[in-house]
Image (tube, coloured by chain):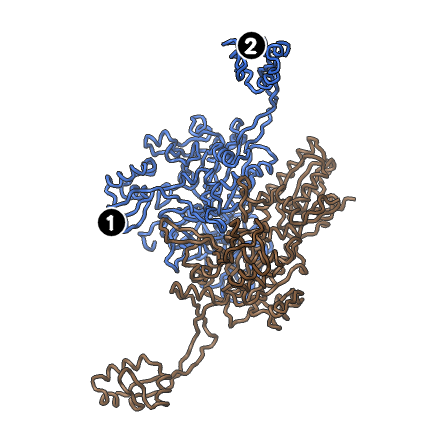
Chain colours: A brown, B blue
Amino acid sequence: MEPKQTQDKYEKITELAKRRGFFWPSYEIYGGVAGFVTFGPLGTILKRRIEDKFRDFFIRRFGMQEIESSIITPGKVFEASGHLAHFKEPLVECLKCHKRFRADHLLQEQAKMSDTETEKLSLKELETTLKEKDIHCPECHSKNFDTPKQFLTMFTTTIGPYSEATGYGRPEAAQGIFVEFKRLYEYAREKMPFGVAQIGHALRNEISPRQGLIRLREFTIMDVEYFFDPEEPCPWIKQIENETIHIIPAELKKKNIKKPIKTTIKKAMEKGYVKTPWQAFFMAQAKLFLTQLGVPPDKQRFIEKLEWEKAHYSLQSFDQEIYLDRWGWTEVSGLAYRTDYDLSRHMESSGVDMRVYKEYEKPITKERTVIKPVMAKLGPAFKKDAAKIVQLLQKINPKDAETALEKQGFIMLESFKILPDHVKISKEKIEEKGKHFIPHVVEPSFGSDRLTYITLEYAYQQKEDRTVLKLPREIAPIQIGVFPLLNRDELLKKAQKIHKKLFDAGFSVEYDDSGSVGRRYARMDEIGTPLCITIDHQTLKDKTVTIRDRDTRKQVRTSTKRLISTLHDYFHNNKRFEELGTPVK
Amino acid sequence: MEPKQTQDKYEKITELAKRRGFFWPSYEIYGGVAGFVTFGPLGTILKRRIEDKFRDFFIRRFGMQEIESSIITPGKVFEASGHLAHFKEPLVECLKCHKRFRADHLLQEQAKMSDTETEKLSLKELETTLKEKDIHCPECHSKNFDTPKQFLTMFTTTIGPYSEATGYGRPEAAQGIFVEFKRLYEYAREKMPFGVAQIGHALRNEISPRQGLIRLREFTIMDVEYFFDPEEPCPWIKQIENETIHIIPAELKKKNIKKPIKTTIKKAMEKGYVKTPWQAFFMAQAKLFLTQLGVPPDKQRFIEKLEWEKAHYSLQSFDQEIYLDRWGWTEVSGLAYRTDYDLSRHMESSGVDMRVYKEYEKPITKERTVIKPVMAKLGPAFKKDAAKIVQLLQKINPKDAETALEKQGFIMLESFKILPDHVKISKEKIEEKGKHFIPHVVEPSFGSDRLTYITLEYAYQQKEDRTVLKLPREIAPIQIGVFPLLNRDELLKKAQKIHKKLFDAGFSVEYDDSGSVGRRYARMDEIGTPLCITIDHQTLKDKTVTIRDRDTRKQVRTSTKRLISTLHDYFHNNKRFEELGTPVK
């Protein structure tokens, strides 16, 4: 009984999303602009609940800070971070119709080359490969292309009234964190490790965006930057070391092996698949997070990026991929070990010291070579120049001087030849109490638009005659539907009263008295409302209502007196549906 | 005992904000860029709580929809909306140092002219006034300025790889709502009135932004667009008609009267100060909202914009102003009656019908004139042309034909002269069941950055030796501090246990065991934490803790058993502090 059997899940969800107000392409009245999506009333709530879940899962649970910085970012920041040089994609123009395309995407689509293969190609190689593979323009079918060029995929603008003040739309929220590192470290009471997150819009001026919510020009990024001392262990790794993940490490990928290894975090560390325990820690968390959003573990995997696929700032990167009906394995988050790259670059560019100070548990004693003038010899030998030589001696490296004296028997300071008896070389013990270092960073990075789509796809079910969104109860946009069973005044009034009571208690609740109860249930199932409450004649007699479960269609009858706490238990204390009342046969 | 008596509140709050992680100027390591601010950990929470309060107060309470659309907006939208033509400010360049300024701001700062006065001036008049008032460059003191120009204060960029696809950073979220009107109306089940809101970043490329959070280049806008039928009354006006507001209507402002009239919404409507009850309704709500954020009613006023001060889309605009220590009366929200301006413009530009259909309660019967051929006369008179004349008769306006026949005795249809007996003119009754119209819109528009600053300024108090932020309890970033009274193991353990319990129950709670309890209280007062819980020796004996009130410094003692529900009552059910336990002497 499925309508239009030819539709894939993407089409079905896109249709549902438009019709029920989850999301749709923006600016349709002007013909639309690729890469921009508007979230409607239900989609806005769903997306925000996913972001709030992220907040709860990552930020709050691990005591991280959250900040909010600007999308428009001055040019200097992306010069320093390397984005201006690296945030580019190969663009090619059809010489006949003058449409422009991603050269690598043409090869992927028409020659079935993989990401891994195309990423490796230089502009020159792209040009020859386009010819070799006989690629045609998807618009006009010409095979005549211009030379591929690098296209900067950041939106460019001017800040203020001076044309030289270039600004960019941030392609990641991370830089807004790195440039503020000193203040954030201070806020963390100068203690490592600590994490900072940012959730906000980001911009990528894609050459030809496709795939709806999966690849947008404007999207919401959720970046975590976790700062740590690479010499210290990750104290939480024990908690998740037995968590299982599916992983394709670089060594397998290079051999073109596509079947992931199923292993524990502990084993993945032992095998050396993951270069820092912090990365492994967040891989486990990312897996758990997606599982909570409804994606089963076997539909998730981590695939390592090869040397030429990684972002310029990363020592080791994994894509967390999940399986989608239309696109197959699709990136849902990126986990990058950014090391001290970004802080070092900003330190260099700004001249501001980004190092932190680490006090040793016990001071470390080190030996230092010292060189001192022997004035009794130096004075007579150099007379009025002796004072100058004393100054020069302070500037040289005593260790080098010692070696020179040993090897060649003298040292030259400008034009003065210093002999072994002019100076005294000795060893001193010094205590080092700590050291300065630049913290390392691992970054798990998600997009909430993409997560919204993925959540919808995994929640989407067609059963017999109905569509059900099996959204996790804590993110469903409408929590409860309230219906009078029949269109009679006393039932309508009672239902409205219960609706108001639940609304005032803070639930997101929708009242509906139009059409048959069956149709009303179906409407609620289709938007993922977990519970529906029906007011019937028995309600008027004994002050009970029925509650219906979206997924099983089972019903229980419960007292209106305890209704708020009953529902509170279900939504906030994870109580099972069956515990909400006595079953209705 | 106040330190640095010369600091005004703005300086004090700015200093506190930096030190405690509320907000600070962005990109300081690169010398800063005017008009961009970063919200730190506490500021991010505070700002989001203000936005959530807005959501609750406006969106949820009035059953509005919330949507999320993109910041980058295609050029066509702002062409249609009139922003491309009107969203400009007068820029003037100093010919000596080549710095650029807002011409009107120079006149306001140096010649003490008002907004109202400078807004009226054309570019030509600005030029002569700069000379007349002997204005100098604030940078180099030269009095030699270039001719003022209009500067577009939208950020401009290019969407995608084609240079002709201009995009702008949205200066308001409203257009993202208007262009989606048809889908939103459908979602509202095609019923009027309904409201749509959007909270998100917006961009204004200010020429020379000043005033910290008050005037930013990137900020968070909270726009409500309320769509209504101008022929129908506002059903909720009764609820707030006795609400008092302070208002300076245009007629007073023109006479340069600056003292507002204190009046009720009802009277303001009767006097004709406000042109639609929907505007009046939202003025009352805006006042109540600011009052809940801590601004007393006598520090608030509504001031009407004069003809030349209003935005191009507005029939009537009020600024809601509140009084700030440094800047005096400052705009906190704008309330614009945008009529059907925006929907009409988009309808015209896109060719998409934005009208809604209104069914009359009872069909309206109208009389229509009908003209019909009398074939018995027409046939013989025109022979083979008769058929053509029948067609032509269908195209003319019967009313005009009737008049022509009465006045001149014939009508001309092309070259055919039609006489009275060739046609029959009659009257028919027709029923009109409804009509199409373009909805009107009122718009209350807030900025959450600005509200964050205002809330902080009104919460800021210095008492004897301490600074207290008297933030309303529902928006305080940290709700509860938890302290062990003394640094003893058994107290530390117990305090950490209570901290975890409250954290797990969802409270935002901070544990602190460093320094004296007095210092810890002071730290919490300074960031506006309403309650502090102290664990002492008595806790170990009788399982009670003290709770201290930020504002009165009073303490109560209460059982740890009921602690969660006690705190829940305080934060969510508005219970008074005194009711939380037994007073401590």
Residue nearest the viewer, comparing A513 with B343: B343
Residue visible at 47% across and 62% down in the picture: A188
Q: Residue furthest right?
A: A585
Relative vertical location of residue B197 with respect to residue B556 in this rendering, above or below? above
Residue visible at 55% across and 33% down in the picture: B353
Residue nearest the viewer, comparing A95 with A572: A95
Quickly name the residue at label 1.
Answer: B141
Distance in Å between CA atoms under marks 2 and 1: 84 Å
Tag 1 subunit: B
What kind of residue is marked 1? His
Quickly name the residue at label 2.
Answer: B419
Tag 2 subunit: B
Q: Residues within 10 Å of mark 2 (few under 14, many from 20)?
A: some
What kind of residue is marked 2? Leu
Q: Quadrant of residue B22?
A: bottom left
> SS class of the residue under badge 1?
loop
